[in-house]
Image (tube, helix red, strand yellow):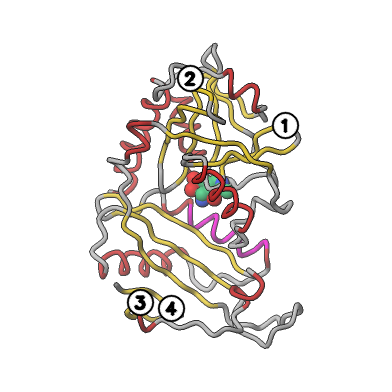
Amino acid sequence: RIVFLNGSFIPYDEARIPIMDRGFLFADAIYEVSAVLDGELVDNEAHLSRLDRSLTEIGIASPYSHAEWVVRQVELVRRNRLVEGIVYIQVTRGVAERDFGFADAMSPTVVMFTQVKTILESRLAVAGAAVITVPDLRWARRDIKSVGLLAQVLAKRQAAEAGAAEAFMVEDGFVTEGGSSTAFIITQDGVIVTRPLSSDILPGITRLAVLRLAAEAGLRVEERAFTVQEALRAAEVFYTSASTFVAPVVSLDGQPIGSGRPGPHARKLRTLYIELARASGRD
Ligand code: PMP
């Protein structure tokens, strides 16, 4: 397995990061994940734009241009012979003696690796996902794709203990988003509802594509917050992310959603997204 560390492609076993790295000590770091389908990156320009935005928001100068990132991502995919999975990018503020304060001229640590994942033939897509709700305990800048993911780690452990695949985070009675996904419902009269973009949620790249596909397919879309009660009464519930595409939800907190089977709109949107993802990779 070959990984990328600070400009070099090296075997995983040889990749070393100093314990004074601020990513390790402070979670002073951001990350990005692009899917790979048929050996090609999916909607990657949008992911690189969000990477730039995350870097800007925490004041790290982008180490590479989009074109330079892509060359490295493609090289990593090639060296690992990755057909289906993800490319993970992480940028930390860098290495310095532990101190909350940091110098302006630090050199960031840049890490990239690939992971094999079954996206198309995923069991979740066929059987549908069980989801639980948990209080959203995260910080107030969820629009930054920070590696400070402790709240999500704990939420997902709770989900796993309940036999669920994902946790929807809840604040003031309203769903913010999934632990690592964007949450959607489809009301009984067929309206697709998802929370509008703000600092409350990560601006999902898959979210944007799916909203466009839904509108093109003639479905009504509303960007507004929805409650857990509304989700329980919805015709369908689903979530989206780069690594799961569109995942139909069949139960929420142990209660069946709709028929208790993946709904027709979620399945349709999944099919449409797969077509789009394949097309984007061939660009
Ligand atoms: N929200 C959170 C908290 C996430 O971790 C993710 C996965 N990166 C998403 C939403 C979905 O974003 P995307 O569609 O860009 O993967």
Whichever of callouts 3 and 2 sits on the residue coming sooner in the sequence is 3
For label 1, the crowd category at 10 Å Cα-Cα, with few meaning under 14, some 14 to 19 and many 20 or more, is: few
* Residue 283 makes an appearance in the image: no
Q: Are marks 1 and 2 in contact (CB under 8 Å)?
A: no
Q: Which residue is mark 1?
A: 173
Q: Which residue is mark 4?
A: 5
Estimate the x, y position of residue 180 in percent, counting from the top left.
53, 48
Q: Check mark 1 vs ligand 1: CB closer than 8 Å? yes or no.
A: no
**Secondary element at image label 1:** loop
Q: Is residue 243 above or below residue 20?
A: above
Q: Amino acid at mark 2?
A: Leu
Estimate the x, y position of residue 114 in percent, counting from the top left.
36, 63
Residue located at (61% from left, 84% from top)? 20
Whichever of callouts 4 and 2 sits on the residue coming sooner in the sequence is 4
Q: Is residue 142 above or below residue 18?
A: above
Whichever of callouts 4 and 1 sits on the residue coming sooner in the sequence is 4
**Secondary element at image label 4:** strand
Quadrant position of residue 121: top left
**Secondary element at image label 2:** loop
Q: Amino acid at mark 1?
A: Gly
Instruction: Determine the CA span between mark 4 and mark 1.
Output: 42 Å
Q: Which residue is mark 3?
A: 12
For label 4, the crowd category at 10 Å Cα-Cα, with few meaning under 14, some 14 to 19 and many 20 or more, is: many
Range shown magenta: 47-57
